[in-house]
Image: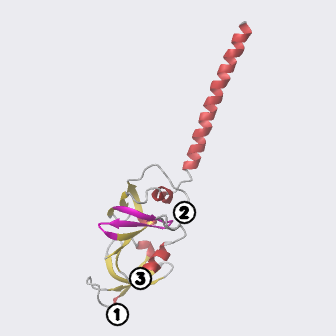
């Protein structure tokens, strides 16, 4: 009888040790999985919800997140569409803990991750939309004429949207300096 109690006690200790080991393994796996989640994944999980972004340029943007791609976000801020390079985002408020790994497909309200910032800017260029290109130090109003690998040409246009932008009115902006691009 004494050995039965000893074996029961040993079995109980083993069960507790196994449970602790399992809890530790689950915690380690959870930390490892969390380490693979990107900001893009977290943003993709809140498409359609309001966010508050603080940009590197010291600018605050509050609006509804419409798209989350690997290099850029599309927000609607006070009724205007705004493209924000993801690398310009310093911090985000309004994110939950959820993540949506992988790119959403067309018709799901999400831009496929393969659409780079260059793709988005070339689309705006083809559309001939008058935009505001905001950098940390100034704002340029005009039409995007060309999009290179690391720069874009903006032809100045008066705020009323008329004018073609003579060659002297073209400014070349480094893509790395863009804080955001918005419709006028």
- The residue lying at 49 percent from left, 64 percent from top is 108
Magenta-colored span: 63-80
Q: Dot 3 corresponds to which residue?
A: 127
> Would you say residue 115 is visible in this rendering?
yes
The earlier-in-sequence mark between 3 and 2 is 2
Nearest the viewer among 148 and 9 is 9
SS assignment at label 3: helix
The earlier-in-sequence mark between 1 and 3 is 3
Please state the horizontal and vertical placement of residue 155, each as a whole percent of the image.
Answer: 36, 86
Nearest the viewer among 33 and 148 is 33
Toward the front, the furthest residue is 107
Nearest the viewer among 89 and 104 is 104
Which image quarter: residue 73?
bottom left
SS assignment at label 1: loop
Q: Going by the image, does 177 lie left or right of 28?
A: left
Please state the horizontal and vertical placement of residue 181, each as a whole percent of the image.
Answer: 37, 73
SS assignment at label 2: loop
Foreground mark, 1 or 3, reads: 3
Q: Is residue 143 above or below residue 60?
A: below
Q: How many marks?
A: 3
Q: Decide: marks 3, 2 in contact (CB < 8 A)?
A: no
Please state the horizontal and vertical placement of residue 164, each as a whole percent of the image.
Answer: 34, 91
Please state the horizontal and vertical placement of residue 169, each as a whole percent of the image.
Answer: 34, 89
Question: What is the crowding at mark 1: few (fewer than 14 residues within 10 Å), some, or many (at least 20)?
Answer: few
Q: Dot 1 corresponds to which residue?
A: 166
Which image quarter: residue 141?
bottom left
- The residue lying at 53 percent from left, 65 percent from top is 105
Q: Decide: marks 2, 1 in contact (CB < 8 A)?
A: no
Location of the N terminus (image quadrant): top right
């Amino acid at each position: 009888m004494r050995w039965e109690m000893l074996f029961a006690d040993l079995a109980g200790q083993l069960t507790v040790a196994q449970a602790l080991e399992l809890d530790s393994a689950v915690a380690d796996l959870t930390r490892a999985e969390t380490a693979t989640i990107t900001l893009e994944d977290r943003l993709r999980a809140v498409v359609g919800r309001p966010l508050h972004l603080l940009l590197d340029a010291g600018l605050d943007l509050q609006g509804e997140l419409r798209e989350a791609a690997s290099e850029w976000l599309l927000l609607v801020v006070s009724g205007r569409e705004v493209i924000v390079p993801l690398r310009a985002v310093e911090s985000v408020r309004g994110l939950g803990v959820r993540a949506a790994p992988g790119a959403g497909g067309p018709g799901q309200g999400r831009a496929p991750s393969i659409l780079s910032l260059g793709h988005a800017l070339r689309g705006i260029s083809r559309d001939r939309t008058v935009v505001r290109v905001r950098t940390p130090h100034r704002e340029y109003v005009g039409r995007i004429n060309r999009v290179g690998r690391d720069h874009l040409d903006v032809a100045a246009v008066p705020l009323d949207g008329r004018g073609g932008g003579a060659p002297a009115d073209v400014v070349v902006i480094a893509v790395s300096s863009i804080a955001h691009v918005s419709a006028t």
